[in-house]
Amino acid sequence: MSRIDELIAEHCPGGVEHRPLGAVGEFIRGNGLQKKDLFDEGFPAVHYGQIHTKYGVWTEETFSFTLPTIAAKLRHASYGDLLIATTSEDDEAVAKATAWLGNTDVVLSGDAYIYRHSLDPRYVAYFFQSDRFQDQKKRHVSGTKVRRISGSSLAKILVPVPPLEVQREIVRILDTFSKMEAELEAELEARKQQYEHYRAALLSENTDGVSRALGEIFEMRAGTHVKASEISGDQLETHPYRCFGGNGVRGYVSGYNYDEDVAFIGRQGALCGNVHRAQGKVYATEHAVAVTPKSEVDMSWSFHKLTEMDLNQYKTKSAQPGLAVGRIKELVITLPEIKEQRRIVEILDKFDALVNDLSVGLPAELAARRQQYEYYRDKLLTFKELEVA
């Protein structure tokens, strides 16, 4: 019998009371803090967008600060409070939360809530990640393009409230899983940096070749417009061809442009310079440039080279930055002989699989670890409900 089973048998053998979050705490709306108020030093501050992108289950430090004069006008979170981002463009991210465990107060922006409660801080933060929380949350999320949830709605969600000893043991177990996941993420990031270093060395420092403009080596064509209504999210019999935009596969369409091994370069806005590769019958939207070799050029080498070039740096400096096909064609590279291209590909494909292939290497191990963590998180946070007489 595990330690958690022993604690449950000792402290709550008949089950655990499930109470509304509003009954074990209060939701306090953040206010006033804007992105322009954030600095590199000063009073600890968290903008709701940072909860989505920079923070995990808990934190002791902030990435940003604000002026003490600004902080004095804002609502403060204290040690143990939960910081909750209440808006997002997708439902899953609504109510993403992190527990504040710093030794000072912190201020929070609007579109966020402070949850002040009587639970173990990390226990309730893990609960906000759980399937049980997500399932209850769905019925309270509202809005069209921007999805949101209110403090009054969050207050209605039921949370299992085991004794503190049980809460802390659950936190200890889940912290162990989180630490192992963080270590794998750090190793994967180090491998990615190593991969990028070797890729640059092999592709940029190779002087044994001829200088050629990309337009001499490749056929480059901008894709064509397709209506959003014509794109399917699933591969249906009536929409069997993958549709590529600037950020990769957008869906499936009934017609196709290309029936070959092709690379796609994103050419609009923040997606400028993204490089993807596809084989078979595919469709390219106007947000992508389709690239195919004109002569004896290895397509795998081409993919690695186009990725390494960081094409985003060549986008236009306008209100809507983009990559012009003519500008890309003018870029000059050193083209090694085909034998050398294939030698480079053999090395880089191994690195690429190690850091990007979800079926092998570190990504596969990390995916398995995350799946294991999610399984035990939801299992540990599921309790028999105490029957109240």
Image (cartoon, rainbow, N blue to C red):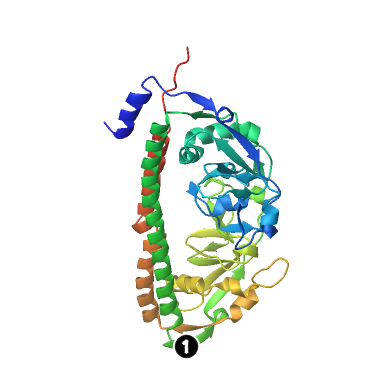
Residue lying at 58% horizontally and 41% vertically, measured from the top left: 95
Residue 387 horizontal side relative to residue 316, left or right: left
- Point out the image quarter for the N terminus: top left
Residue lying at 50% horizontally and 51% vertically, measured from the top left: 60
Across and down, in percent, residue 369 comes to 37, 48
Query: In what element is the residue under mark 1?
Result: strand
Residue lying at 58% horizontally and 38% vertically, measured from the top left: 115
Across and down, in percent, residue 231 comes to 61, 50
Instruction: Tell me which corner region of the image, top left, top right, bottom left or bottom right, holds residue 289.
Output: bottom right
Across and down, in percent, residue 24 comes to 55, 29
Q: Which residue is mark 1?
A: 210
Q: Nearer the viewer, residue 361 or 231?
A: 361
Residue lying furthest right: 319
Instruction: Tell me which corner region of the image, top left, top right, bottom left or bottom right, holds residue 331.
Output: bottom right
Residue lying at 41% horizontally and 22% vertically, measured from the top left: 15
Q: Nearer the viewer, residue 115 or 204?
A: 115
Instruction: Tell me which corner region of the image, top left, top right, bottom left or bottom right, holds residue 377.
Output: top left
**70 to 386, vertically: above or below:** below
Residue lying furthest left: 1
Q: Nearer the viewer, residue 367 or 233?
A: 367
**205 to 171, vertically: above or below:** below
Task: Please state which amino acid type lies under the numbered disc 1.
Answer: Val
Quick one: label 1, few (<14), some, or many (20+) residues within 10 Å? few
How many labels sit on residues?
Answer: 1
Across and down, in percent, residue 270 comes to 62, 63
